[in-house]
Amino acid sequence: MGFSLLMYVLLAVTGGSLFWHRQAQQPRPRWWRSLHIAFGSILVGLVLLLLAVGIIGTLGHFGSLGHSPHLFAGLTVVALVLISAASATQIHPRHPWVRHLHIGTNIALLGALAWVLLTGWVVVQKYLP
Ligand code: HEM
Ligand code: HEM
């Protein structure tokens, strides 16, 4: 999870730089975009991994899902990350709303990550004496 937060920060920095270069109409180094996409792919992989671990671990331990809002928070994070990545592939100067969707889902993602951390922390407390 710490690693996915790090990825989020790196994505915000590299994405912010892409944004700045476009606003200033400066040519941007091509590897900067590749770096952003690489970080993005890692984030997608990590979030899917955490989802799998969460579901398999909970099923193995309890035999059922849905013990807390953490399930809903986790699914929200996964959905937002997938929408963000899907919209990113469609970013094009001719459809500016796709870029707004990408940026909007990523701002929402910040809140969802905080939510999954908090609810995850709450379920961790259940296992502590
Ligand atoms: C989920 C994984 C992600 C993928 C696969 C991804 C991919 C992309 C791609 C392909 C672009 C378009 C670059 C271009 O203009 O050619 C882009 C732009 C951008 N992304 Fe991401 N991204 C991801 C996550 C994020 C996150 C988490 C943030 C912010 C916290 C972010 C912020 C931005 C910003 C600000 C832009 C600039 C758009 C512009 O040109 O104004 N991205 N991203
Ligand atoms: C993107 C991040 C995450 C995703 C997608 C995710 C997803 C899930 C899912 C779907 C479950 C099954 C929950 C249920 O059915 O009740 C689960 C369980 C669990 N998760 Fe996460 N999780 C994430 C992050 C975290 C974090 C940051 C923590 C700790 C702070 C955490 C701790 C736990 C624990 C302890 C369980 C067992 C739940 C229980 O006993 O009810 N998770 N996770």
Image (cartoon, rainbow, N blue to C red):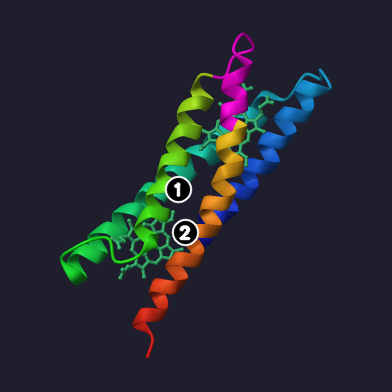
**Distance of mark 2 from mark 1, alpha carbons?**
7 Å
Looking at the image, can residue 35 be seen? no
Q: Earlier in the sequence, mark 2 or mark 1?
A: 1
| Residue plotted at (51% across, 19% down) | 90
| Residue plotted at (60% across, 34% down) | 104
* Residue named by callout 1: 77
Circle 1 crowding by C-alpha within 10 Å: few under 14, some 14–19, many from 20: many
Relative side of 22 to 91, left or right: right
As drawn, the label of residue 20 is: none
| Residue plotted at (37% across, 91% down) | 129
Above/below status of 35 relative to 45: above
Relative side of 3 to 25, left or right: left
* Residue named by callout 2: 116
Instruction: Classify the position of ligand 1 by quadrant: top left, top right, bottom left or bottom right.
Output: top right
Q: Residue furthest left?
A: 63
**Who is closer to the viewer here, 124 or 38?**
124
Q: What element carries label 2?
A: helix
Three-letter residue code for mark 2: Val
